[in-house]
Image (cartoon, helix red, strand yellow):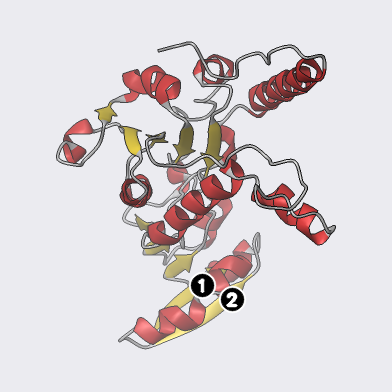
Amino acid sequence: MLRVAFVGALASSFADRVRAHLTVPCDFLHVEEGASSALSDVEVLVTIAFTRAMGAAAPRLRLIQVPGAGLDRIDRAAIPPGVALAAAHGHEGGIAEYVIGAIIALSRDLGRVHTSLRAGRWESQWAWGASPPPVWPELAGRTLGIVGYGRIGQAVARRAHAFHMSVCAIRRDVGHSTGDELTFLGGPASLPDVLRRADYLVITLPLTPETRGLIGPAELGLMKPTAILVNVARAPIVDEDALYAAMESRAALIAGNIRRVARGEPPESMVSSTP
């Protein structure tokens, strides 16, 4: 009988669905993270993390199954010879829907509008006697930049096309996507061009030594001040300090424009002059 260990709460949450697809008898074991001593007779590990201690404690191990796409918590050097490592996909549709939903919510400031409505203020162009807010922006004709054009990036692009957006994408192996209906497709060296063009930027890369901190001060400085960044990959791909500084700068520009308008002066442009 095959002995399968689910390590941690996330992995354990998939146990019933895994059992429903199995055609061989299996004995399931639920293990807390860090409890390596329980792995001595385990042949399959379902886990989001793998350490040297886990490898040493599981001499019968044959397969490490990650219940997700990311492998950044797997110490590959600790995997014993002959042991297979597998990740999962099939979740790209849900993530792509979230990306489009986030873009719409952020573009139309739905969080603030919802809060105002709950406080009894209806912010609408059609509210009687109210000062109209800015006209809502539309996605049609805007440019979506996708950094990491794999399964998730491609799912986002298909949905963006339904909104009549232009899509510019970056991927390591450009030849795999040359037939897609993209406005632009380039390799890693084309990242600055995509950053300059994007009204919305989506990060869908895996976290690797090469992608850690990929979006830093210089890259954020190339983006339009009005651009919206949606990162559905690992957080360290974007330099957190640089992101905070960029957001702080944008907030200062908005506050300055409010003061300028109050004085009857024209607002400072928030549209990048970079072609």
Q: Quadrant of the N terminus?
A: bottom left
Determine whether the residue tagged by mark 1 lies in a helix, strand or loop: strand
Graded by Cα atoms within 10 Å as few (under 14), some (14 to 19) or many (20 or more), the crowding at tag 1 reads many
Q: Give how far across and how far down residue 132 sits, in percent.
A: 69, 41
Q: Which mark is residue 5?
A: 1
220 horizontally vs 100: left or right: right
In the visual, does 155 lie left or right of 97?
A: left
Asked if the residue at tag 2 contacts the one at tag 1, i.e. Cβ–Cβ closer than 8 Å, the answer is: yes
Three-letter amino acid code of the residue under disc 2: His
Q: Secondary structure at mark 2?
A: strand
Specify whether residue 41 is in view: no
Residue hosting label 2 = 30
Q: Which label sits on residue 243?
A: none
Q: Quadrant of residue 3?
A: bottom left
Q: Residue at the spot x=68%, y=40% of the render?
A: 133
Separation of marks 1 and 2 at Cα, in angstroms: 6 Å
Q: Is residue 144 above or below residue 232?
A: above
Viewer-side residue, 251 vs 126:
126
Q: Judge whether 253 appears above or below 91 on screen.
A: above
The image shows residue 94, relative to residue 204, as above or below, that is: below
- Amino acid type, residue under disc 1 in the picture: Ala
Comparing 241 with 117, the one in front is 117
Q: Quadrant of the C terminus?
A: top left
Q: Is residue 67 visible?
A: yes
Q: Which residue, as the protein is rendered here, is positioned at the far right? A: 119
* Residue 195 versus residue 157 in the image, above or below: above
Residue 261 image position (x, y, % from top left): 76, 19
Which residue is located at x 68 percent, y 13 percent?
A: 266
